[in-house]
Amino acid sequence: RAQELDELRGLFGDVSPTASHTPPITEPLIPGVKPGMLRRVKIFAAMNDQQLGRFVQFMEIERVLSFKEICHQGGSGDAMYCVLDGEVRARILVSGRETTLATFQPGDVFGEICLFDDGPRSADVLANVDSTLLKIRGDRFDRLCREHADLATPFLLALGRTLTARVRADNKRLGELIALNRGS
């Protein structure tokens, strides 16, 4: 082992089992966000603590009161959100009646399509209860991709998996609706 060679021992410091180690950091990466809340977000699962700490520097906290609109259908998409605490819903109005498309809880993300195109929002998103969101704006995401590929890569892979799961679920739901409509 390299640490046992006299010439290299000084580079490793004291790595003996009895050596005291610095305790892990338990302070929040973002003021007001409890440690561990970020680990609820599924797309951060593949990131180590160091990557996560660097990644969240590109994000900001948004606290949303119950029933407040976060995104408006047809509006410009300028940010993606992660739900840290609370619950929000995506909805569309059809003939003046609300149809809930999805409900997002701690660990879920929404609004990610705007990171890839400049199209309008596809649904309204409203808070069901007071919620804490983590937000990354499109311009910050672009900078992250240009300057920090080591952070963008695990994020994009996780986001791709999330989008793939949603497409599969939507295809299944659409197939069920078509079968119901045909009387099968």
Image (cartoon, rainbow, N blue to C red):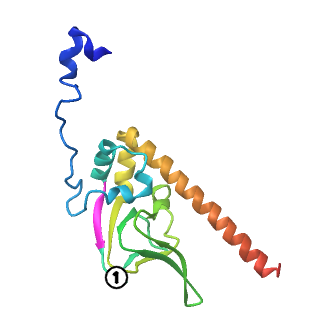
What is the span of residues highlighted in magenta in the rendered image? 59-63
Which image quarter holds the C terminus? bottom right
Q: Which residue is tagged 1?
A: 66
The location of residue 126, given as percent across then percent down, is 41, 78
On whether residue 61 falls in the magenta region, the answer is yes
Tell me: residue 169, above or below residue 179.
Answer: above
Q: Is residue 91 above or below residue 25?
A: below
In the displayed image of the protein, which residue is found farthest to the bottom?
96
Of residues 92 and 7, which is closer to you in this image?
Answer: 7
Residue located 50% across and 47% down the image: 157
* Prevailing SS of the magenta stretch: strand
The residue located at (21%, 52%) in the rendering is: 26
Q: Estimate the x, y position of residue 4 in percent, counting from the top left.
A: 26, 14
| Mark 1 surroundings: few (<14), some (14-19) or many (≥20) residues within 10 A | some
Residue drawn at x 23%, y 13% as measured from the top left: 8
Residue 159 in view (yes/no): yes
SS assignment at label 1: loop
Compared with 6, 127 (above or below) is: below
Q: Position of residue 16 (x, y in %)?
A: 22, 25
Is 40 magenta? The answer is: no
Q: Amino acid at mark 1?
A: Ser
Query: Left or right of 148: which side holds 21?
Result: left
Observer-nearest of 17 and 84: 17
Q: Is residue 90 left or right of residue 24?
A: right
